[in-house]
Image (cartoon, rainbow, N blue to C red):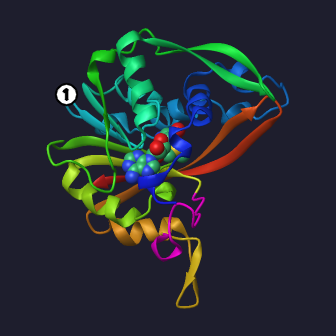
Amino acid sequence: MSSSSQPFYESEKAISEYLLFHYGSSQEQCPHPEGPSEALHYPERCVSQCLQKELLGDHPRALDLGCAVGRSTFELARHCHEVVGIDYSHGFIEHANKLRIEGSLPYRFAVEGNLTQDAVAKVPDEIDRDRVRFLQGDAMHLREDLGVFDVVLMANLIDRLDDPVACLSQLSGLLKSGGQLIITSPYTWLEAYTPSTHWLGGLQRDGENVQTLDGLHHHLNPAFQWTQTLELPFLIREHARKYQWSVAQGSCWVRR
Ligand SMILES: C[S@@+](CC[C@H](N)C(=O)[O-])C[C@H]1O[C@@H](n2cnc3c(N)ncnc32)[C@H](O)[C@@H]1O
């Protein structure tokens, strides 16, 4: 399925799961004491663990590509004066915008079968929501009036794109020299989203195993210098007794 026809990220199920994934309390995200608590609050950790704050200059600008319902976009606003969140899903952007305007949003998430639990998604009070802007758009064909950024975050996006290289090839023009690029992903390559001829890794080429980090180095060099790699577990709740536990790799790069 190409990103131009992806019903999942427009569905009520996806909107509910992502509101919970981005804004749910620890107890709402996983009520089981034996669950992997270190995998909670991933959209916050993509910023708190990956952003190199010491590299930020004055009045930094950030871009969150594939922002979904916007939690990382708001988290970037703790450190950056202007943040743009872009997602292909109209439904996600509509909900992110409601959160920007109202600061909170009631929703329901799945418990079991048709049973749901009421919840409220809330942007932390200390975050200045006026610093944030959400736009519907395609990360592979970005509009030309975005300007240049000090930070670009791509969280769990790269393996959901039809043509990841089309997205990566725009980045050197979007980042200032010294600006940072953060790419996180569990590298779940699927033909349903990305034809295997476009996978960055997870296959053999000329008899050699290619992992996605190798592919990222190949496509980002020489414009970007790799700085660090991190392990970022995350948990997506489907219902009270079914979860997706994954471990994303975060890679951080600086525009030369
Ligand atoms: C797996 S979700 C990750 C969302 C969010 N960054 C997170 O970590 O929770 C992938 C996101 O990429 C978005 N997406 C897919 N194709 C896109 C494209 N071509 N341009 C922009 N966003 C896209 C989807 O709508 C979805 O919000």
- Graded by Cα atoms within 10 Å as few (under 14), some (14 to 19) or many (20 or more), the crowding at tag 1 reads few
Judge left or right: residue 17 versus residue 6. Answer: right
Q: Is residue 182 visible?
A: no
Instruction: Report the front residue among 39 and 142.
Output: 142
Quarter of the image where one finds residue 70 = top left
- Left or right: residue 131 compared with residue 46: left
Residue 209 x, y percent position in the rendering: 59, 80
93 to the left or right of 122: left
Residue at figure coordinates x 63%, y 13% from the top left = 119
Which residue is located at x 67 percent, y 48 percent?
Answer: 246
- State yes or no: residue 198 in magenta: yes
Task: Please report the residue visible at 55 percent of the width from the left and 70 percent of the height from the top.
Answer: 211
Residue denoted by label 1 = 59
Q: Height in image: 59 above or below 129? A: below
Q: Quadrant of residue 128?
A: top left
Q: Position of residue 222 (x, y in %)?
A: 28, 68
Quarter that holds the C terminus: bottom left
Which residue is pictured at 41% across the width and 68% down the height? 217
212 relative to 209, above or below: above
**Front residue of this view, candidates 82 and 116:** 116
Q: Find residue 34 and report its horizontal and vertical position in percent.
A: 85, 30
Instruction: Give the magenta range.
Output: 187-199
> Where 163 falls versus 253 (above or below)?
below
- The reply to whether the magenta stretch includes residue 104 is no
Residue 3 can be seen in this image: yes
Mark 1 lies on a secondary structure that is: loop
Query: Is most of the magenta stretch helix, strand or loop?
Result: loop
Give the quarter of the image for residue 94: top left
Residue 37 position (above or below residue 247): above
| Residue type for callout 1 | His
Point out the residue furthest to the bottom here.
Answer: 206
Q: Residue 20, position in %: x, y? A: 61, 26
